[in-house]
Image (cartoon, rainbow, N blue to C red):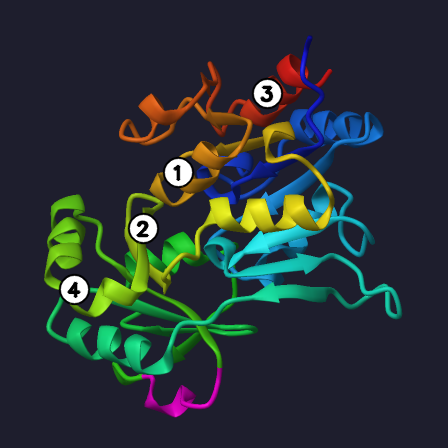
Amino acid sequence: MERKYKIIACDLDETLLNSERKVSAENVEAIKKAREAGVRFVLCTGRGYKSTEGTLKEIGLFGEKGEYVISFNGGAITENSDEHNQDSPRLLHFDALDFDVAKALVDKARDYDVCMHAYTKDTVYVYNFNESERSYVAGRMDVVEIDEMSIDFLRGQDIVKVLFMNESVEYREQMKRDFADIAKSCEVSFSSNRYIEFNKKGVDKGRGLSILAQKLGVDIADTIAIGDNFNDLAMIKAAGLGVGVANSNEGIKPYCDYICSRNHNESAIAEVINKFIL
């Protein structure tokens, strides 16, 4: 018997969004039809909730009660509307890094050629905001630039994630080895072919999807996860159907149940919805 999927968890960058950082008209229409068929479409991103609002508006989910976003690589789950205030999202789940661990990561990274991001619930602080990173981030999220490689000023605030950008995969892999002792209490992932990311141990997109499915009374086998990179791998493995878009990192493709024939610029999400939902 053909399985009836109830949740689609979808990565943003290089998956749902095209190179113009937009959702194609074909994807928008397919998402609309999936929702009409009773399927929830859940953005699942390494970014914070606030940075998803433009995309939520594009796909008709902004301010929608009973619709959700998994953000910070599973560090937060948010309902798109609070029952008392339609214009205010409702935070349902949050997992922060231990501050001293986050500080140790940032302090060690001072000796490396990286751009640093530190994520609180509402703000992304960036050090060494070089031109490559400035170009990549533009249109994706707002950041606050800082002029010192330190997060001491954030003590007392929840830090959900820190990441470091270097465009060399070998450099990032060496950092993972070099940071191994500090990162024993972290979940380490790679994303967008430019970042090494550190969340609290056990926090990943797969766990985020599992928590949301449980809250909604949905069997994890009745979920689809769509992504393109290593920080999507946990949800691709956790979901009933794990999907990689055509432009996925080659390292995650062996773990996918289905690889799209289309990439993020060719409405790959519509391909998945048409094949497995409609």
How far apart in space, not on screen, are marks 1 and 2 (Cα)? 9 Å
Q: Amino acid at mark 3?
A: Val
* Residues tagged 2 and 3 counted as in contact (Cβ below 8 A): no
**Magenta residues?**
151-157
Residue 272 circle label: 3
Marks 4 and 3, the one that precedes in the sequence: 4
Contact, mark 1 vs mark 4 (Cβ under 8 Å): no
Mark 4 or 2, nearer chain start: 4
User: Crowdedness of circle 1 by 10 Å Cα count: few (<14), some, many (20+)?
Assistant: many
Residue drawn at x 41%, y 22% is 246
Instruction: Report the front residue among 43 and 28.
Output: 43
Label 4 environment density (alpha carbons within 10 Å; few <14, some 14–19, many ≥20): some
Label 4, label 3: how far apart the Cα atoms are: 37 Å
Viewer-nearest of discs 4 and 3: 4
In this view, the residue farthest toward the right is 84
Say whether disc 1 or disc 3 marks the residue closer to the N-terminus.
Answer: 1
Q: Residue beneath label 2, please?
A: 189
* Figure check: 226 above or below 44: above
Which element is circle 4 on?
loop
Along the horizontal axis of the image, is 26 left or right of 131? right
**Residue 155 is covered by the magenta coloring:** yes
- Asked if residue 146 can be seen in this view, the reply is no
* Residue appearing at x 15%, y 58% in the figure: 175
Which quadrant of the figure contains the C terminus?
Answer: top right
- Which amino acid type corresponds to the residue marked 2 in the rendered image? Ser
> Which residue in the protein does label 4 denote?
179
Residue 277: which quarter of the image? top right
Q: Position of residue 183 (x, y in %)?
A: 24, 64
Answer yes or no: is residue 150 visible: yes
Q: Which mark is residue 233?
A: 1
Give the image location of residue 266, x and y in percent: 52, 22
